[in-house]
Image (tube, grey):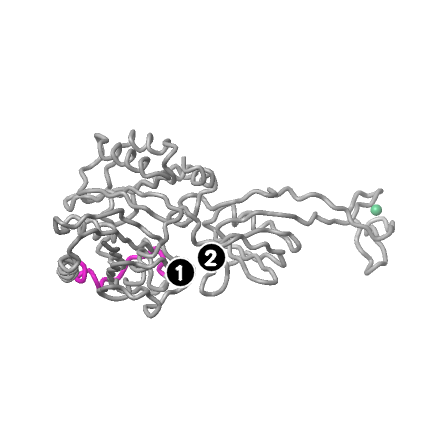
Amino acid sequence: MGWLGLDDTDSLGGGCTTEVLHQLVKSLPANVNAGQPRLVRLWPFAQRRTRGNAAVAIELKTDNEQELLHFLDQHWTSQIEPLGGEIQSSHHSDREQFPSDPGMVWYSKPEPFAAFYRNGLRREIHLEELPPATKSWGGNGRIGASLAVHWPADIKTYEAIAWRLKSCEGPRRLDQDAMQIIDEMEETFLCRDHRLGTSMLAPRGNSPVLFGIRAWTKSGAEKALQMLVDGPDTESTSGSMIFETNQATDDHLDDAFEVEVTGVDVIKGGHTRIRSDSNHYIAFRESGDIARLAQHLRTGDIVECKGLEAPDETIHIEGLRIRAIVPDRSRPSCTECNKAMTSMGNNQGLRCKKCGRTMEDAWEESWRNLPLGVWIQPPASSRRHLSKPLKATEAIQNNL
Ligand SMILES: [Zn+2]
């Protein structure tokens, strides 16, 4: 009885750590029982993160641990170690590329270590920090592997993943009717970016994954998986598994920061920086309404921001809520000419440039039409795997 973790096997060749785990489970000795597999998303800024930035783990039960370790040794050498060394693909070409460096860990009796997992979603973790494993294999991947084992799984969601046959290439064939029904199921989430009208069930690019269906409940994941696999237009799969995951849990976020805006800059690429006395907050163009709203903020506005601190110490905004806004101020208009009066200097009153009429210093305030007290989130396809969709809060709390 113990936990196995695995990470950093993704490569440009199109590998996926979930499939590597699936293959391992399929070849386990007959006297080993596989428990619940896990898919754990990690700190998005990790220097050597993998493409999906996720590690996997699974509970394995056996009464002969030595035999299991012998199997794992052999499986590591023949199947997993050779995956190392390939440069990982990445959507971010400005990021330094690292060759994949697979790692595997075995913990006979993992001790609860919630702080380790928590740190693993907020900062770089180094090999020296890992809780000592019963046995470990490989390199940098041991970090994610160990974090996946130590995820406390207090709050969890599910993802049903199915893999393609080796013979299948090109566009993925998925039954459209089944996809439609799955999207409408109460138990599933993030099946579709409704704004873009695109499905989010199939991964983009080169991957052995045919589809992944995210669900609030295990039974929902099972039901949707069966429906899509059975869909007449869905291509054959090489297998499937239902993972427990930390997706859509907001585990990576702390409480929101309440901020008084001291300035707003639109920066290169259409991104927006909100300045404050404590931190700088970045709303990326991809965050949609957040970036648009951020551009309308002014000095003195009070906002709440949720987000992760990046290595450059800016906070990348994943949620924005306006608490209070300063009104627009303008000079009153001349009662004769209807033109805005101008100041003649500090406490020296106002003057109409056209007719010369003067009056005492004054401001007119008007309300700025911005949404108050409402959390704004990026569109579904720009959201982190870890981010909880706004509507989800109740679904998780009630556990359906
Ligand atoms: Zn005038």
Q: Which residues are magenta?
A: 80-93
Viewer can see residue 372: yes
- Residue 295 position within the rendered picture, expressed as x and y whole percent measured from the top left: 57, 51
- Residue 183 position within the rendered picture, expressed as x and y whole percent measured from the top left: 36, 34
Which quadrant of the figure contains the C terminus?
top left
Name the residue located 62 percent from the left edge and 56 percent from the top edge: 261
Which quadrant of the figure contains the N terminus?
bottom left
- Residue 347 position within the rendered picture, expressed as x and y whole percent measured from the top left: 84, 58
Please tell me whether mark 2 sits on a helix, a strand or a loop. Answer: strand
Left or right for 302, reference 250:
right
Q: Amino acid at mark 1?
A: Phe
- Residue 209 position within the rendered picture, expressed as x and y whole percent measured from the top left: 24, 46
Neighbour class for label 2 at 10 Å: few (<14), some, many (≥20)? Answer: many
Viewer can see residue 10: no
Q: Which residue is mark 2?
A: 308
Q: Which mark is residue 321?
A: none
Q: Amino acid at mark 2?
A: Leu
Whether residue 88 appears in magenta in the rendering, the answer is: yes
Whether residue 100 appears in magenta in the rendering, the answer is: no
Label 2, label 1: how far apart the Cα atoms are = 9 Å
Q: Which residue is mark 1?
A: 45
Please say if 69 is above or below 223. Answer: below
Q: Specify the quadrant of the image occupied by residue 141.
A: bottom left
Does the magenta stretch mainly form a helix, a strand or a loop? loop
Name the residue located 66 percent from the left edge and 54 percent from the top edge: 300
Please tell me whether mark 1 sits on a helix, a strand or a loop. Answer: loop
> CB atoms at circles 2 and 1 under 8 Å apart?
yes
Mark 2 CB near ligand 1 (8 Å cut): no
The one of 131 and 157 positioned closer to us in this rendering: 131
The one of 265 and 146 positioned closer to us in this rendering: 146
The one of 169 and 86 positioned closer to us in this rendering: 86
Q: Earlier in the sequence, mark 2 or mark 1?
A: 1
